[in-house]
Amino acid sequence: MNDDQLLRYSRQILLPQIDVIGQQKLLNSCVLIIGLGGLGSPVAMYLVAAGIGYLILVDDDQVELSNLQHQIAHGQGDIGRNKVLSAADTLKKIDSSVKLELIDKRIDGDKLKQAVDSADVVVDCSDNFNTKFLLNKIAHNCRKPLVSGAAIRMEGQIAVYDSRQQDHACYRCLYDDTGELQQNCSENGVLSPLLGIIGGVQAMEVVKCITKIGKNLSNRLLILDALEMTWKEIKLQQDPACPVCSKIITFKD
């Protein structure tokens, strides 16, 4: 760590739980973020500010005018641009030294597995269930902690699905992948600051997973009712019949 980095991260290094050793772990880490919208924006910005050294950003969408109300990594001049390119410009303004890998198309199967394999932590900031279920399978099989968030209307939730832990619950233990589950902000609306709250908690959980401090949200689902500003915690248990975490998933070409 050089002198500039010691000064930049001095407020974190002062924390006994982090110190120089923890900060170096952050600088040496790689985080995969799926989705650079309402949640991915604050997650990516806070992680760069905290000193994550390498980010893999995945999003195949373009910036639209309606995104600007709640996707703070993008500005008016970014309308029509791919979100990973727009977000990369914002992140480089925070720290020009951060290493970014930009994937501006939808990836799945082996390509997604390769991206998950190369990361220390995976962050699910997607807004559709098909992506969430697939990412859960791959993160489980690759034994990578998955920090999952969701926000809609005035409600949000966060959990950490950590397959490195014994008897862990995964996303599929919580939700059934049959039937019509799709809900997103474009159809149901969302209050802008809610995404900052949920995204900020996701970023905190990533830092905790990398530095191994505190107690993360593994086997716990944290739910926010922003209208009443109340938090509720639900204990999660592994489903013995879960088709994902009750067995190892194999991949086919």
Image: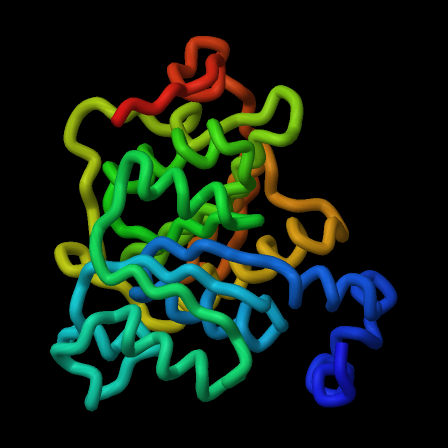
In the picture, which quadrant includes the C terminus? Answer: top left
Residue 235 versus residue 66 in the image, above or below: above
Task: Judge from the rendering whether residue 186 lies leftward or rightward of residue 8; answer left or right.
Answer: left
Q: Who's the residue at 49% across and 61% down the image?
A: 229
Q: Quadrant of residue 72?
A: bottom left
**Which of 225 and 116 lies nearest the eye of the viewer?**
116
Q: Who's the residue at 62% across and 72% down the image?
A: 51
Residue 74 visible in the shown view: yes
In the picture, which quadrant includes the N terminus? Answer: bottom right
Task: Judge from the rendering whether residue 194 lies leftward or rightward of residue 71; answer left or right.
Answer: right
Furthest toward the front, the residue is 253
Task: Judge from the rendering whether residue 172 lies leftward or rightward of residue 78; answer left or right.
Answer: right
Residue 1 versus residue 172 in the image, above or below: below
Q: Who's the residue at 38% across and 19% down the image?
A: 250
Q: Quadrant of residue 132?
A: top left
Residue 224 point in image, percent of width and height: 46, 53
Furthest toward the right, the residue is 16
Residue 211 versus residue 97 in the image, above or below: above
Q: Quadrant of residue 227?
A: bottom left
Residue 174 point in image, percent of width and height: 41, 28
Task: Give the tally of numbered discs.
Answer: 0
Q: Who's the residue at 58% across and 55% down the image?
A: 206
In this picture the colour scheme is rainbow
Residue 245 point in image, percent of width and height: 48, 20
Residue 235 visible in the shown view: no
